[in-house]
Amino acid sequence: MTSTAAATAVDPIAERAAVAVAHPNIALVKYWGKRDEAMFLPVTGSLSMTLDIYPTTTTVRLIEGSADTVVLNGHTAIGQAHTRVVRFLDMIRARAGRAEHALVDSTNAGPTGAGLASSASGFAALATAAAAVYGLDADARTLSRLARRGSGSASRSIFGGFAVWHAGEGDGEAGDLSSYAEAIEGDALDPALVVAVVDHGAKAVSSREAMRRTCATSPLYRPWADSSAADLDEMRKAIARNDLPAVGEIAERNALGMHASMLAARPAIRYLSPQSIAVLDRVLALRAEGVAAYATIDAGPNVTVLCARADAQRVAAALVELGDFVAPTVAHLGPGAALVTGRER
Ligand code: DP6
């Protein structure tokens, strides 16, 4: 083969497959509640930091078969996990005017389904790889809108660092166009997040069902949503002025308020375990000792602790002292979703 021929030859594998990597994000102002379930439009805006740990790597390969195959962490997915991915691919195919089926192979380096945002990294990686392989010309904002349709919080994992996801306005298509995530300036603030894994298991109630039930039945939901809008404004200002204690205080109260609204749902949803409470107590004690450490908790028992980079090892050591049930990992700000091979965006 001449060098010219080599340069112009189409690589059939690169044309038919794309690989993307995305990282989880932890919300400092939470997304909890949808105003439009079908379009994944949130009741409130939210704000997160993308982490540099637990990446998800997803390959989407076009195949000749008559159905999609989904492999998650080495196991063929069935039931709801399979359906969620197939529906997502259907949406991408409809937009791209394509019909080919795909083999989706996704590996998550962190604990899946335990409230550590594996669906965020998962759908951010899937959106990025699927858009590439089906030839959608999607910029980052569009990718965040697409990822949102797989899992709301995935919209934020398209971006590295701090990201805000705008609630947007209206329902249906108007809502879809206006509800996207974008990166926000927060370069000066470079905190650590100590992830205290107290339980690796999948949760008893999915976050989707839990947020649905909270919205529908909790008398504390509306007050939380109203206060969360104010938290978002204050959080953006606190990040802009590089004020870690304010960021931590807002994040902690926002998360505890979200869990309070769940506890008041009927029937109640309680993700916090005795181990979670032990970590919360230790965080309070650290603050009393003069360490600026603040907790946040997603839809699961695991607690993440925000602190200054310089304090991360001290915080992690304090959590280790609680006993074998805590396995702390230190994370920092991580990158946005990116293609590894295949077509460039
Ligand atoms: C508690 O994004 O997993 O982590 O949109 O139904 O897929 P769906 O929900 P999901 O919910 C995440 C909720 C949260 C808070 C957050 O990440 O903002």
Image (cartoon, rainbow, N blue to C red):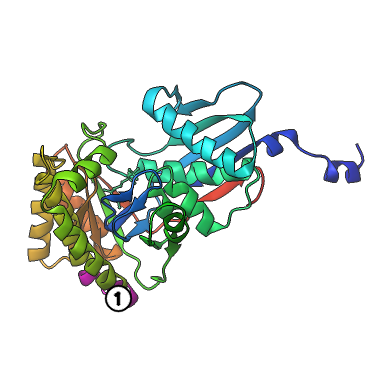
Q: Residue at x 31, y 53 (%)?
A: 26
Q: Which of 213/195 is in front?
A: 213
Residue type at mark 1 is Lys
x, y (%) of residue 201?
Answer: 25, 31
Horizontal relation, residue 246 to residue 180: left or right: left
Asked which quadrant contains residue 291, the reply is bottom left
Q: Which residue bears the numbered disc 1? A: 237
The location of residue 257, given as percent across then percent down, is 14, 56
Q: Nearer the viewer, residue 306 or 17?
A: 17
Asked whether 286 or 185 is in front, the reply is: 185
Q: Is residue 252 visible?
A: no
Region in magenta: 237-246
Q: Residue at x 76, y 37 (%)?
A: 11
Q: Is residue 273 visible?
A: yes
Q: Position of residue 255 (x, y in %)?
A: 19, 55
Placement of 4 over or under 315, stated as above or below: above
Examine the structure image and report whether residue 301 is included in the region drawn in magenta: no
The number of numbered discs placed on residues in the rendered structure image is 1
Instruction: State which quarter of the image contains the N terminus.
Output: top right
Is residue 154 positioned above or below 177 on the image?
Answer: above
Quick one: label 1, few (<14), some, or many (20+) residues within 10 Å? some
Instruction: Give me the residue at 51% from left, 44% from top.
Output: 127
Whole-percent x, y for residue 337 in the image: 50, 51
Magenta stretch mostly in which secondary structure?
helix
Q: Label 1's element?
A: helix
Residue sitting at the far bottom: 241
Q: Is residue 64 left or right of residue 37?
A: right
Q: Is mark 1 within 8 Å of ligand 1?
A: no
Tell me which residue sits at (14%, 44%) in the image: 217
Residue furthest out toward the right: 2
